[in-house]
Amino acid sequence: MNNRIRTWLEATSVYRQPRVLAFLFFGFSSGLPLALTGETLRFWFTDAGIDLGLIGLTSLIGTAYTIKFLWAPIVDHVNFGRWGRAFGRRRSWMIATQIGIGALVLALATLHPAQNLMLAVSLCVGVAFLSATQDIAVDAYRIERLDVTTLGAGTAMHTGGWYLGARLVGGALALEMAQLFEWQVSYAIMGGMIAIGIAAVLLNREPEQADSAASEEEHARQAEVDHFVQSRPALKGSSARVLGFLYVSVVSPFLDMAKRNGKLLIPLLLLVIFFKFQDAFAQVMTGPFVRGELGFTRDEIAKVYKIFGLGASLFGIFTAGLLIRPLGFIASLWIGAILQMLSNFGFCILAVAGHDLFWLAAANGFENFASGIGNTVFVVFLSRLCSSAYTATQYALLSAIAAVARTFLAAPAGYLVEGIGWFNFFIVSGLSAIPGLILIWILSRSSFAEGIRAEEAGRR
C-alpha cells in the first residue's frame, strides 16, 4: 500500500518539472486565438448588429484548423535562416506565428465590425491561419520535447492551458472586459496576452532531437530530392525539384507511417477515428436535449456548464496526466474509453429525471471529467504514432482524420433521435464505443503495445 502511495506521489511531482509546466502557457497561447475568432467574436458581432446569417457564416473562419495538415510539411521542413539558427526550427515558427497573431488581434481591436465587416473577417481568417500554424509547431515541439515519462503530464498541462485560454480568458474574461469597457478594449487586452506565449518560448529551449537532427534531416531530404529528380529523367529543371520537394515533404511522411506500422496501420487509423466517436456522437445532440427537450433555461445551463463543466474537464485532464505514468499508457487508454462510454449513459438518467438541476450537473460533470481524461489520453496516442522525422506533418494529418471523420459519422444523430427517442439515443451513443474498445483490445495484444510497455519499463 505504501509503495502504491509513493508511486502516486512521484507521479504528481512530474507536474513541477519546468519543461512540463511550460506547456500550460503553450496551451494557453493555442486556445486564446480560437476563442477570439469563434464564440467570443460572434458575441461581439451580435452586439454590433451584424446580420444573423453573416454571423453564422463566421464558423467558416475556423476552416484552417481542419485543413492545417496541408501546410504542415512546410512547418516540418522549412527553417528561417539566421532566425532559425538563433531560436531553432520549432521555436522560430512558434514565435513568428505568435507575433503575427498578436499584431492581427490588436489591429482587429481598432475596428468596428458594422463599419469594417470584411476587414474584420479578413483579420480573423489571418488569426485562424496563424493560430493553426502555431498549433502545428507546438504539437511537434511537445512530442519532441517530452519523453515517455513526461508526455502524459505535458499533454495534460497543454490541454489544461488550452481550456484556460479558450474558455476562461478568451471566453468569460473577454466578455467581462467587454461588459466593463467595450469590445475594442477587450480585444486589445486579449491581443496583449499573446505575449505570454512568446515569453514561454523564450524561456524554454529547442528540443534536443530537433536541434541536433535539423541539419542531418536537411541533408537527407536534399539527397532524397536529388534521387527523385535523377530517377525521373523526363522531369527537368525547377519543376522537377518542386515535385521532388512535394514528394519528400508530403508523400514520404505517409509512407513512413505505413512502413513503421505495417499491418497495424489500419487498426491504428480506425482507433484514431473511433476512440472519440461516442463522445462526439452524443455531444452533437446534448444542447438540443437539455434546452429543447428538458427546458433548462440559458442561465441554468450556463451556471452548470461553467462551474461543473469546466472544473470537471480540468480535473479529468490532470487526472489523466497522473494515470499514464504509474498505470502505463495502454491501461490509461482502456480507462479513458470506458469512462467515455459510461458518461453517455448518465444522460439516460437525466432523460428519466427530467428537469432536475442536480442530475444535469451530475451528468454534465461526469461527461466532462470522462472527456477530459479521454482527450488527454487520445492526444498522447496520436503523439506516439508520429516519428521524429515528420512530427508536424503526421500529427496534423492524424488530428485532421479524427476531427473530419467524427464530424461526418456523427451527422445522422438528429435523425436517430427522431426515430428512437432520447433515452434510447444515449444508450446507442454509449454502445457506439464498442468498436473503439475492440480496436484497443486488438492493439493491446500487438507489437504496438509490446513496444510501448518495453519503453515504459526501460524508463522506470
Image: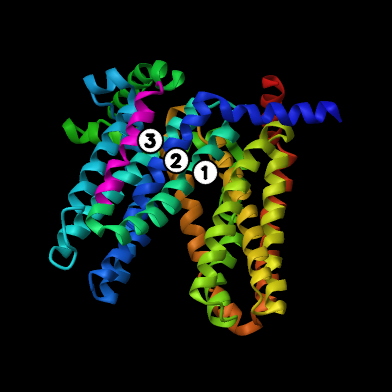
Is 228 left, or right, of 119 in this rendering? Answer: right
Residue 181 or residue 148, whichever sits in front: 181
Furthest residue toward right: 1
Upstream in sequence: badge 1 or badge 3: 3
Q: Quadrant of residue 393?
A: top left
Q: Which residue is mark 1?
A: 160
Q: Amino acid at mark 1?
A: Gly
Upstream in sequence: badge 2 or badge 3: 2
Residue 385 or residue 146, whichever sits in front: 146
Mark 3 surroundings: few (<14), some (14-19) or many (≥20) residues within 10 A: many
For residue 261, say whether it is visible.
Answer: yes
Mark 1 surroundings: few (<14), some (14-19) or many (≥20) residues within 10 A: many
Mark 2 surroundings: few (<14), some (14-19) or many (≥20) residues within 10 A: many
Q: Quadrant of residue 345?
A: bottom right
- Quadrant of the snapshot with the N terminus: top right
Residue 394 at x, y percent in the picture: 45, 39
Q: Which mark is residue 365?
A: none
Q: Amino acid at mark 3?
A: Ala
